[in-house]
């Protein structure tokens, strides 16, 4: 029997949400403090064919606005150890960074020395500049580029690195549309003896067309079937889809499994950074009402 207020259950998983931004999107924002509460965690991307100096600049701006920047370090885009050293040194000394997300990156042709996350972790540079926490990528529905066995083996190596160095890691996942595969995936990690906090990827409110395009390009698995079905209906392409049912199901799944390590939500602002940030802020404050469709409606400010 449910004894907790459903609104509190949903608010609990929405606490301390994070959001992603690209350097290009950041150029459109004059003052982050007008959109985000202080200390909001903002991931700064380092995308293929871009310069890491852009990631440094956005991280600096976020820090000066009172936010907590978490820049991406994309292994395949780093040319050598000296470049990695300069990158991390600049982030920590000029941008107030003490947390990074380390990913392999999507480039099929590594820039030079690095081609996987573990090479960055084993470089010693994160310890050198006193990085306090490291995020690694998670793929609840697998990856089109690597087998599940290799993904699990890679995660175990990262977990062992964390135990060895004393630097905590957490998993930040790709975005999904359904809670069940996420909950099953997290339990599988626990069953392998790894206790790792998780930030779950959530697509911010966006049109069906936009969500379908991003899901298709990102290699999202079976959970995109709902979006695929809706995208076939031309009349629905420009309807804005919010992630309320996904979050509703996820929050109750976490509530019903006290051992679950899913702690926070990470928003991908496909429908716009400001729009997603305001939606997430209202969610965190409990400014929403559950509906009869297994989701909820945000009260627009």
Image (cartoon, rainbow, N blue to C red):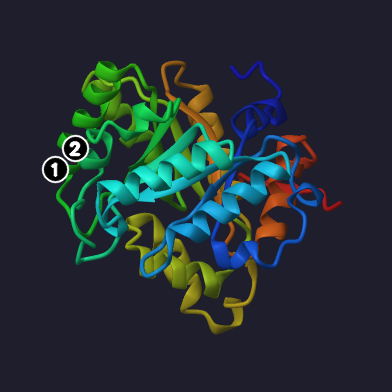
Figure check: 201 above or below 183: below
Residue 163 falls in image quadrant: top left
SS category of the residue bearing label 2: helix
Figure check: 295 above or below 258: below
Query: Residue 80, image x and y in percent?
Result: 24, 52
Query: Residue 275, image x and y in percent?
Result: 71, 59
Mark 2 and 1 residues: CB-CB less than 8 Å, in contact?
A: yes
The residue where tag 1 is placed is 150
Q: What's the CA distance linking mark 2 and mark 1?
A: 6 Å
* Residue at 77% in and 35% down: 285
* Residue at 41% in and 47% down: 87
* Residue at 35% in and 59% down: 220
Q: Which residue lies furthest to the bottom in this view?
A: 234
Other-residue count near label 2 (Cα within 10 Å), few / some / many at <14 / 14–19 / ≥20: some
Query: Residue 284, image x and y in percent?
Result: 71, 36
Number of marks drawn? 2
Q: In this view, does 287 lie to the left or right of 126?
A: right
The residue where tag 2 is placed is 154
Can residue 290 be seen here? The reply is no
* Residue at 19% in and 52% down: 115
Residue 76 falls in image quadrant: bottom left
In the foreground, 293 or 176: 176
Residue 65 falls in image quadrant: top right
In the foreground, 267 or 288: 267
């Amino acid at each position: 029997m449910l004894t907790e207020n459903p609104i509190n259950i949903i608010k609990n998983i929405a606490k301390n949400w994070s959001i992603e931004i690209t350097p290009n999107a950041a150029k459109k924002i004059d003052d982050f403090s007008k959109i985000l509460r202080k200390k909001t965690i903002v991931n700064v991307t380092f995308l293929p064919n871009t310069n890491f100096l852009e990631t440094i600049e956005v991280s600096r701006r976020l820090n000066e606005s009172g936010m907590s920047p978490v820049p991406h370090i994309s292994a395949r885009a780093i040319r050598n150890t000296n470049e990695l050293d300069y990158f991390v040194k600049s982030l920590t000394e000029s941008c107030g960074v003490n947390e990074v997300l380390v990913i392999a990156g999507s480039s099929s042709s590594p820039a030079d020395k690095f081609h996987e996350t573990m090479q960055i972790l084993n470089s010693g540079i994160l310890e050198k500049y006193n990085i306090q926490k490291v995020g690694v990528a998670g793929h609840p529905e697998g990856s089109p580029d690597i087998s599940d066995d290799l993904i699990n083996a890679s995660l175990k190596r990262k977990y062992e690195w964390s135990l060895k160095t004393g630097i905590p890691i957490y998993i930040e996942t790709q975005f999904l549309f359904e809670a069940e595969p996420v909950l099953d995936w997290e339990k599988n990690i626990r069953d392998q003896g790894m206790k790792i906090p998780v930030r779950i990827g959530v697509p911010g409110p966006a049109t069906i067309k936009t969500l379908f395009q991003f899901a298709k390009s990102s290699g999202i698995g079976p959970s995109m079937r709902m979006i695929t079905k809706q995208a076939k209906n031309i009349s629905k392409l420009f309807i804005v889809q919010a992630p309320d049912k996904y979050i509703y199901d996820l929050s109750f799944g976490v509530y019903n499994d006290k051992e679950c390590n899913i702690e926070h939500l990470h928003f991908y602002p496909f429908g716009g950074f400001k729009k997603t940030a305001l939606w997430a802020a209202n969610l965190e404050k409990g400014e929403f009402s559950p509906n009869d469709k297994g989701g909820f409606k945000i009260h627009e400010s």
